[in-house]
Amino acid sequence: MHNDRSPLNILLVESGATKANWALLSNNECVFKEKSPGLNPYFLTDQELTDQFISVRKKLPKEIHHIYFYSTGCGAEDQKKRVATLLDRVFQPVHSAYVNTDIIAAARSIGPHNTGLVGILGTGSNACFIKNGEIDSSAGGFGFILGDEGSGAALGLLLLTGWLKNELPPDIQLLVNSDLHLDKAEIFQAVYKNPFPSRYLASLAPFFFKHKDLPWIKDRVKEQFDWFVKRYFLTLIDENQSVKVYLIGSVAYFFSAIMKEVLKEHHLELGDIVKDPMDGLIAFHTHHLG
């Protein structure tokens, strides 16, 4: 059992659809980091989650007192309870695991007292408005079939549908054929049969970054970001309300120049864009132990 004199060990997990980041804090210092595939409980069985947890547990250098697990797919209470039960069973922490969504991680990672709009733009997309470090309202997070505007999956879906329907500009069509070597049967298998279709779609997003200076590419990314801002950010604030915007995720990070353009057009002030929220989460939990 933990007492006041022994080190306090906190395991942090932050997961999107594609990858998960793990960190172990011991008395305010990060003593362990690890990456694993994404841990969305909607796409993984109990056994698959357990296997990934065991893989990490074997590498941990210390016993665990607290677990804070943040992941896409953990908004519903039944999924929170399910994941917490599996975490407790594998890691046997002193205190029962805390489970919540990745948007909570994003909000906490920008600081405990900030107010503003927070957006996740990675494999999927999500948004919330926070007041003094707490989520006031949220929008998005519907998955690539129902939403995810501005995400890697949305960009990949746009590219695939354009290619399949022969609607891409000739120069883009040539680049797709030379860079990606797409195959209809493989696309249908990946999207309709294989697990994690959003990961497959998002795996095409680097094509956009590679050719980001081409007008069609820039226009499509800007269009996606514009939809994200209009459909999610602007629905969370009053008209002409002055707030800062904080963005997290690989798509926001790699296309930051285009995102800055879109935010400026909508008169939104950028606070920060970071690729990975883990450093901010570590800082948050260093000051909010246990």
Image (spheres, rainbow, N blue to C red):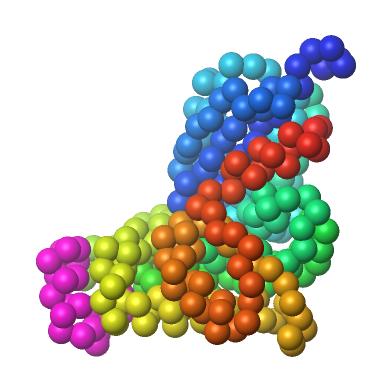
* In the image: residue 45, left or right of residue 89: left
Q: Position of residue 198 (x, y in %)?
A: 43, 62
Between 191 and 154, the one nearer to me in the picture = 154
Residue at x 24%, y 87% (from the top left corner) = 167
Residue 115, above or below 11 = below
Q: Is residue 96 visible?
A: no
Q: Main secondary structure of the magenta part?
A: helix
Residue 210 falls in image quadrant: bottom left
Where, quadrant-wise, is the N terminus in this rendering? Answer: top right
Residue at (12% x, 66% y) in the render: 178
Side of 157 relative to 31 (left or right) = left
Residue segment shown in magenta:
159-183
Residue 251 in the image: above or below residue 146: above
Query: Which of these two is toward me, 201 or 205?
Result: 205
Counting the numbered discs, the total is 0
Examine the image and state in which quarter residue 166 appears.
Answer: bottom left
Asked where in the image residue 286 lies, by quadrant, the reply is: top right
Q: Is residue 168 above or below residue 256?
A: below
Residue 9 position within the rendered picture, expressed as x and y whole percent measured from the top left: 71, 23
Is 205 located above or below residue 262 in the figure? above
Front residue of 49/245: it is 245
Q: In which quarter of the image is the C terminus?
A: top right
* Residue at 83 percent of width and 58 percent of height: 132
Q: Is residue 289 visible from the viewing direction of this image?
A: yes
The magenta stretch spans residue 171: yes
